[in-house]
Image: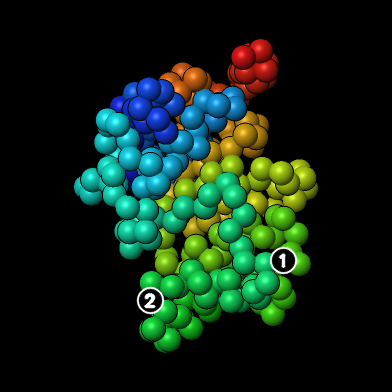
Amino acid sequence: MTVLSAHNIVAGYVDEIDILQNVSVDVQEQQITSVIGPNGSGKSTLMRVICGFLTPKSGQVLWDDTDLTGRQSHTMAGLGICYLPQERTVYPHLTVEQNIYLGGWTFRRDKARIRHELSRVYDLFPMMQERRKSKAGNLSGGMQKILEVARGMMIRPEILICDEPTVGLAPIIAKEVYDTIERLKADGLTILLVDQNVREAIRIGDQIYVLEVGQNKVNGTRAEFEANQHDMIKDWLQI
């Protein structure tokens, strides 16, 4: 069942230039939908439109039966939408536990709920509980990204939207992030993933969308992409 859809999105940062040109993506419930493409193809711009950081010039974003088009980004958490931007968002001078607490900011006065959700997050991420008193800035890059995911789980999201979660990470550290994403999917979470790592995005994705120069190029299932990913990457290197 489609739970999130972006239809015919036209968007850009100035009036004269459209970064996205009639882009459409459908996200299926309890699946990983991967959006891939060469640098400059509009992947991150699409995520900003979906999450309310950029209002499209035309097109529509739907979450179940709710029209998200042009909706303010700060309202998304209340709808069960968790967005992890490409940039690091941990507070390095706060402890791991203090960072996770911030994920419950919208219900911060409900101390019982905060304690309950924190306990649940630690059940999901025992490595965070082990490091709960450590400064977040002392964690590895991969652990900081997992901390961001753990913080997002405080709101019990229905969908996790990840924009380039492993950018800048060594492969062995990036594996920890991919393992976390797969585990959350196995627990029933719907995930929309933008990633520059084509092989991993295809490996863990159920549905794959390719963007090129701000347009839909092709989409299909993991099986349809696995046989052609080498040629696809070769073509992108020539763009």
Closest to the observer, 222 or 167: 167
Locate residue 126, reporting x and y percent.
64, 71
Q: Nearer the viewer, mark 2 or mark 1?
A: 1
Instruction: Give the residue type at disc 1.
Output: Gly
> Where is the N terminus found, in terms of image quarters?
top left
- Where disc 1 sits, the SS reads helix
List the residue tagged with mark 2: 107
Q: Is residue 3 above or below residue 184?
A: above
Query: Which of 236/89 is in front?
Result: 89
**Residue shown at 44%/56% (left/top)?**
82
Give the class, few, some or many, for how many residues have Cα within 10 Å of label 2's Cα (few <14, many ≥20): some
Depth check: give the residue in front, 68 or 119. Answer: 68
| Number of the label disc, if any, that sits on residue 137 | 1
Q: Which mark is residue 57?
A: none
Mark 2 is on which residue type?
Phe
In percent of the image, x 67 and y 67: which residue is there?
92
Q: Is residue 220 visible?
A: no
The residue drawn where x is 38% and y is 42% is 54
For the point 59% across and 50% down, the residue is 87
Q: Position of residue 221 (x, y in %)?
A: 48, 29
Taking the view exactly as shown, the residue that stands out farthest to the bottom is 112
Query: Do labels 2 and 1 touch, CB within 8 Å?
Result: no
What colour scheme has been applied to the protein in the rendered image? Answer: rainbow
Instruction: Name which quarter of the figure residue 90 lies in.
Output: bottom right
Residue 99 lies, with reference to residue 21, above or below; the image says below
Secondary structure beneath disc 2?
helix
Pick whichever of labels 2 and 1 is earlier in the sequence: 2
- CA distance separating discs 2 and 1: 25 Å
Q: Residues within 10 Å of mark 1 (few under 14, many from 20)?
A: some
Relative to residue 98, is residue 68 depicted above or below? above
Quarter in which the C terminus is drawn: top right
Question: Is residue 75 something one can see in this rendering?
Answer: yes
